[in-house]
Amino acid sequence: MEVLMSAIGFGIVTASILAVSSVGFTLQFSVTNVFNLSFGSVMTGTGFIAYALNTSGISIWASMAIGALCGGLISVALNWLIFGRFIRHGISRFGMVIVTIATGLICDNTIQAFVGPTFYAYNAQPGKAFDLAGMLLTGQELIIIVIAAVMMTATHFGLKSTRLGAAMRGLSVNASLARACGVPTRRVVAVAWFASGVMAGIGSVALFLDTSTFAATTGSQFLIMVIAAAVLGGVGSAEGAVVGALVVGLATEITAAYWNPELKDVVAFAVLILVLLVRPQGMFSQLSSERTAVG
Amino acid sequence: MSAATQLYLATVSVYICVNVIASWALDIQFGVTGVLNFSFIIFQAAGAYTAAILSLGPSSSSGGFQQYVGGWRLPFPVPIIGAMVVGAVLAGVVGLVSLRRLRSDYQAMVMLVVSVIATIIAESQTGLVNGVAGISLVANPMVSLIHATRQTQIWIFVLFCVFCMAVVGVVMYATVYSPFGRVLRAVRENDRAIEALGRNANRHRMQAFVIGGALAGLSGALLVEFIGAWAPNGWFYPETFVFFTAVIVGGRGSLTGVAVGAALVGVGVQQAVEYLPITLNPSVIASLEWIITGILTLVFLWTRPQGLLPERRRRFPAPLRPDAPELAERSAATKGDERG
Amino acid sequence: MVAIFHAYSGPNAAFGPEAAAGCFPAEKLINAAGGVLGHKITCDPTDSKGDPADAVPAANRLIASTSSLVGVLGGGSDTATAVVPLFAQANIPVFSTTGQASFDHSTSPYFWRILSPDPAQGGAMAAAAKKLGLKSVATVFGNDSSAQGSAPAAIAGVTKLHLHLVANQTIAIGQLSYRSEVQKLASAKPQAIISEADPQTSATYLSELRQLGTIPDLITDPVSQEPGWRKAVIGAIGASNLNAHDYAVVAYAPLTTLAYRTYTAALKTIGKQVSKPMQWNSDLYSVADYDSVVIMALAMDMAHSTSPKVYNTFIPKVTNPSAGAVVVHTYAAGKAALAKGKRIQYVGAAGAIIFDRWHNAGQGFAIERYKNGNWAVSSVLSSAEIKAAF
């Protein structure tokens, strides 16, 4: 029982980090229909910006906030420079995925050329561990869970109650109709990219804190899990991303506790594939047909 | 010409042949049929591993320092054929799981995930293909077949690779410019129309997928028999992207185009970058290769998405009048491909 | 020209600078003493990319394009089996730091290995555990090739020495968390952990272990003396924590000898070629690479030839003991003694190097601790103690 509880505790931490990142990924997808595989590089980039801030004396949480803002700006810039232009140029859906991969490769390797292949660590103490009903979590991990919960709630209410949220939901369902109703597409799209970048920033700092050391490759390694969680929940659905993150997080930690830890990621991916076999649009998505990209 | 230069030229030749075969394999899957196969590299890796474990002796021999399944010391060319079979079978399995009624980006992601799963399994199950250390001491088949100097053996192997490339080229030509090829292209362009004609788009995707898998396996077998070793570090999932760039730069769907792309991107970029001045930190050079590959893709997708040597646009003659005598024979042969 | 053929990119990207930190000081000292037969030595770094498929064309290109190539430092465990045969075929001596057991009985005349193979290392770690008076230990090894070479020997040694093995873990390198494995280890309550894993894996694992309480003693190997490893783990658990618990079991090379001091003095001056050179001063692989280049130069001097084919056979003649040989510790001293017609035995910064008939030179082992900013030998394992673990 103790093993199970601690596995669940660990799973929740992993899920929190995954959830923030996946919601960022899926929110941007729901509005723009761009499957953005350079999301991992944005995570890496903001993680390193936070590192630069942190090592010059700023507290890690403040660094996270500033890094997240930078992440938002970087995402908007990438869309303005590259993605939006390709979409308006008339590229196919296939082409767009490849464009995002190419962009991701360029960004990742540029970062790597600058920071080198070594591993870095933040100046942050994990704090002592608390025992909550068998789950052993440190102060740092608890803060990460709280931040994730706050971001999820904010996103949920943002989408439901604000005009911007309504505009985003409108664009995600039917872009041309939304445009016809007067939704300022370019502006809403920019906000979606900004939000995605902010989430990437928060997720990356949380991730780098959690793994205690990181390098230029950590973001793209994590990207696969982010996409797995997002696709599992149904890309485009924020609730789906959260549920997907929980499933992936818990599946990995429970596998590690009870079976072979080396294969824990494999199990999570196997769950993804099984879910897609049964429900090809993912758990929560209503959209099974293809839409055109919006830039 | 010194022995060392000869060996270098031989190496470049083998790598060009292997890259061309592999790029043709991806071309059949992606260029012609439109499947975004983001797990492509694992088929080449599976072929390489298969050729290795079939041609090596039992793992307990020579010190037992590497563990792997198989080890039946099969003679040339059985390991190569085995590699193609395994490549095809693996494609079948992956296709079963991913070539379903999934939206194309999900499909691509599932394949990417499959690639990551393959890496994890190969690295963690050390008894399978010796884990992270990889398999080594794979002998070049020409060494035991032909009794001559090592240089001659290597050049004969190069000739063999060129021969394989030529055979694959002929097979590709026959496939791509045949009615079957037309169906594949139709699946790429408009799968709903194909379905409306009563054909199963996914079944055709699977066919293209399996053919591509076999060819990728062949490329892996040739590569491992030349290099002598194979390890997971060499086939992480981003490597698939190099082949995508080759197909895009060369011209998707076009055989000569893809061959040119394979030589340029697969071999050319890598070798050219090495001639940069030594003052550059060597690790930056490696990053530069990827950056150039990415930039090439973006530039081509923006300015010339059809590639350097684009696919020939097929022109069909005007439809025959209903009472034309040719129509009766034609419809017997092709079962309604021409209509609609 | 001596080529540094190691990974400068990919997962093992630290191998390249590590070897450079050995080559360039040697280059400096050799050229300062007048070079070899009037020629200057230059170190040329080449990226092997860390995997066989990319290393083979790079090696072939290196051989083809460099007419003055006299020796290679290279082939780490990631590429050695693929590239060592290539260099051997081109008749170029290659000094490799790979620990793979497959080279234990190497039949290649051009392959030379100064450091012990991985299984010897593993057994030595078990012997060290016994020497430290430990009763219950756990083994935690990453699944990369060098760790997998030493793990079986370490586990077998622990059993043979009648220590209690409370947990035996193989962890996948590069994962983002190891919480469950760490949990299992902590509940097994070992007195010490025998471990080898790459920097990121070790840092993540130890950081999570520390969250559950204090970390037990660590019995590690030369990997833990690499600057990348220390940087990552110190970032994760703090320097005082690490130094208090880390017992590094490494090849016995007293770090106070003239050879070693000569090496570190030269290391300080190569800041242009290697960034932050002094971070490598306790890295045994760098030290071994330094000795390798010095040996190459001395062998060329003794053979009166820079032709690799010719001087290769003189390599053991400058390192193995022989009657009447003058023991030397630097290139300058060796060159001078050879000029006087004497035989020499070069005892380098990595200690005495005695090649057996398979061109392997394992030495004894010692336990080192990091104190006051430096590694120091705290006790030496006798050959009897090591033998008992096998």
Image (cartoon, rainbow, N blue to C red):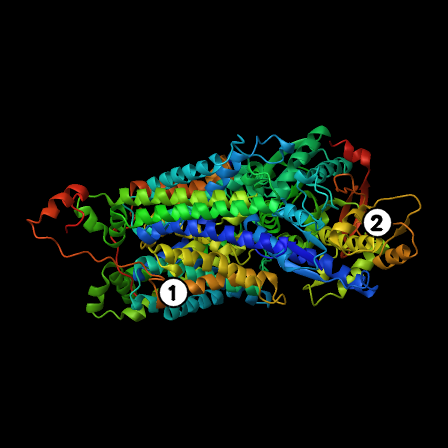
Relative placement, left or right, of A37 versus C144 is left
Q: Amino acid at mark 1?
A: Phe
Foreground of the two, C61 or A235: C61
| Residue at x 63% of width, y 35% of height | B65
Within 10 Å of disc 1 (Cα), the crowding (few <14, some 14-19, many 20+) is some
Relative placement, left or right, of B321 versus B254 is left
Within 10 Å of disc 2 (Cα), the crowding (few <14, some 14-19, many 20+) is many
Q: CA distance from mark 1 to mark 2?
A: 58 Å
Chain identifier of the residue bearing label 2 in the image: C
| Residue at x 42% of width, y 43% of height | A268
In the image, farthest residue toward the left: B323
Q: Amino acid at mark 2?
A: Val
Q: Is residue C366 above or below residue B15?
A: above
Would you name the residue on which mark 1 appears?
B300
Q: Secondary structure at mark 2?
A: helix
Instruction: Look at the image and tell me whether residue A240 can be seen.
Output: no
Would you name the residue on which mark 2 appears?
C318
Instruction: Look at the image and tell me whether residue C148 can be seen.
Output: yes
Q: Secondary structure at mark 1?
A: helix
